Image: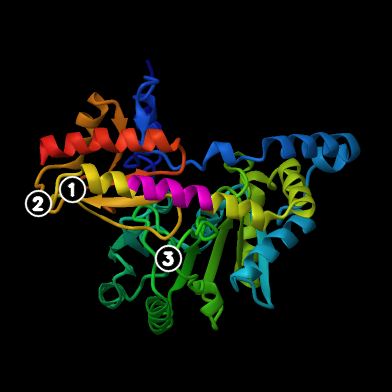
Amino acid sequence: MIDYSKFYADRVKPMKGSAIREMFKRMADPEIISLAGGNPAAELFPADELSKIAGKILMTQPTLALQYGTTDGYPKMKDCAKSRAEKVGAYSEGDSIIITTGANQGIDLTTKAIINKGDKIIVENPSFIGSLNAFRTYECQLVGVDVDNDGMNMDKLEAALEANPDAKLLYTIPTFQNPTGTTMTLEKRKRLLELASKYDVLIIEDNPYGDLRFSGEEVATLKSLDTEGRVIYCGSFSKILSPGMRLGYIIGAAPLLEKIEILKQVNDVHTPMLTQLMCVEFMKKYNIDKYIEKNRALYGKKCQIMLDTMEETFPKGKVTWTVPEGGIFLWCTCPDFDGDASEIVDKCLEKKVAIVPGSNFAIDQSLKSNQFRLNYSSIAPEKIEEGVRRLGAVLTEIL
């Protein structure tokens, strides 16, 4: 048997796969209730509508759907992305748009265009594992900044920027953050932009969950507050239409996106034409905002069921948690627990419920964590209640 490890590039040797994906392999038992995933609710997918749309496209526009497309995206699809971005002020005159194969491709290509080996990226700690792994691929140094209940800690951000004056990039999920579910306040967003200007770093604003607000007031996007062209905005249709269609977009200053477009051409030539055409036709034929309202209502209901059951079943005074105003995640902390959340995960699997330990979202995944993430979007309300009850029993036993 060949020892393939000796052939690996240095940049991939230390990388680990997502433990969330690995956990799915352990969850073949149909009795396991998963509070671990990050999938949208499958019952919301407009499968019938998209089926009819796809059939019509392939009957009437087969060459357009099946032939090569332009790297930056089908023009009408770019118009759709622009219209979504304009609703939150994330498009300005002089900006360019690239349609990506999922929002994570936009994050990856932006990093590839900016980061050299050894460069520093300021990131929230904890943060989205997909983006962290994308950054690690380019052999950069990740500098973590703690996330409070109202977003990234600005004092610690300034300290990190002052200590790392050569940092080139700052990555944030300011609205319904993954994994914490928190939202950065308007005051903090303004302060973040001030600090980015002072220390001259670019910003990736990752906003895949922004459409999923079910309580509270909207907060202006960083991109809408940016007057310098410092923010690269990453949006997605995955959480509002279908993740399997792999449709995302990036918006930013034209000179930077010119370089990113070249990198995308090397990466995958273009985002699949069929799914772009399907999205365009769906948005032309149906009211996407009414469809999003269904998402918001369902996720708000599911989130409240989870919160109510946690309040009822978690051991009193032993666990704290975030209360999201939207998105699909919330974050739990066991402040007096000096063990590792992986112990809780293993015991939960014995009780046939799955959660994700906090170490998966940390800058240093080898450190112990007394935190874990829960998801409420992808399973039925009665399953949420039962899963949280099982989790509550495990927490009571361990804590």
303 inside magenta stretch:
yes
Nearest to the eye among marks 1 and 2: give it: 2
Indicate whether 75 appears above or below 42: below
Q: CA distance from mark 1 to mark 3?
A: 23 Å
Identify the residue at image location x=74%, y=34%.
Answer: 51
Name the foreground residue: 38 vs 3: 38
Left or right? Give the position of 108 relative to 29: right
Identify the residue at image location x=32%, y=34%.
Answer: 387
**Mark 1, residue position:** 370
Magenta stretch in the rendered image? 297-306
The quadrant of the picture occupied by the N terminus is top left
Name the foreground residue: 268 vs 156: 156
**Mark 3, residue position:** 174
Q: Quadrant of residue 357?
A: top left
Q: Position of residue 375 (x, y in %)?
A: 38, 44
Callout 1 touching callout 2 (CB < 8 Å):
no
Q: Earlier in the sequence, mark 1 or mark 3?
A: 3
Report helix, strand or loop for mark 3. loop
Q: Which residue of the protein is positioned furthest toward the top in this rendering?
A: 1
